[in-house]
Amino acid sequence: MTHSSLPSDPQPGDLQRGKAYPGEGVTVYYEATRCVHVANCVRGLPAVFRPSERPWIQAWNAPAEQIAAAVRSCPTGALHYALTGGATEAPEVPTTVTAVTDGPLLLRGNLRLQTPEGEQREVRAALCRCGASTHKPFCDGTHAKIAWKSAGEASPSVRGDDHPEAGQRADGARESSEKAGEERV
Ligand code: SF4
Ligand code: FES
């Protein structure tokens, strides 16, 4: 394969999916159906990611660079950002794939994901490994509810079942309400 045959980086519009939360110098985008992991954003920047408040993402509460760093810590690709002027996240090089014990495959890099809705460009994604997700190819958290076990030793740092409450997401919503078509802030 020649270098020229490598895919181009995702364009800014490719990563601006879901609901937009504007702040100073940055807009955060949140795709609720991709959020299954109640952890990194809230722990990393609690002044901005506030699940018990509305709006739950308060992007005016921190500098743009801090918000961008917190967004990049989201393993599933539920969060993205665009800086004022249009700059978005550059894909990590090389691409990495990490198998979460008892959970999904985490991908980071220059991704072309084939979904039922067509090809999606991505820089981060959690892909179903248990086979039970209703949102394939993405993990939807079902692995924890069915207590799916992967082979191998459990490692607390990468376990996929550290949800405070099964089925709950960072924005405080329950999966059941999402299925009922309830709109979130
Ligand atoms: S948006 Fe969801 S998946 Fe992403 S870091 Fe926050 S809780 Fe985890
Ligand atoms: S690995 Fe999470 S739903 Fe399959």
Image (spheres, grey):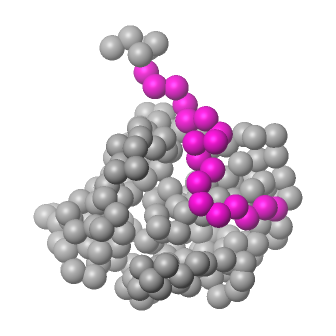
Per the image, is 22 magenta?
yes
Q: Viewed as shown, does residue 41 lie left or right of 85?
A: left
Q: Front-most of 15 and 101?
A: 15
* Quadrant of res 41: bottom right
Vertical placement of residue 142 versus 78, above or below: below
The x, y position of residue 155, in whole percent, is 29, 68
Quadrant where the C terminus is found in the figure: bottom right
Q: Could you tell me which residue is drawn at 59 percent across and 74 percent down?
A: 43
Q: Could you tell me which residue is drawn at 58 percent across and 78 percent down?
A: 183
The x, y position of residue 178, in whole percent, is 47, 79
Vertical placement of residue 131 versus 52, above or below: above
Vertical placement of residue 90 versus 175, above or below: above
Q: Front-most of 72 and 136?
A: 136
* Residue 70 at least partly seen: no
The x, y position of residue 162, in whole percent, is 39, 79
Quadrant where the N terminus is found in the figure: top left
* Quadrant of res 180: bottom left
Instruction: Tell which residue pokes out farthest to the left in this image.
Output: 151
Q: Viewed as shown, does residue 9 lie left or right of 117?
A: right
The magenta region covers: 6-23
Per the image, is 66 magenta?
no
Q: Could you tell me which residue is drawn at 75 percent across and 40 percent down?
A: 86
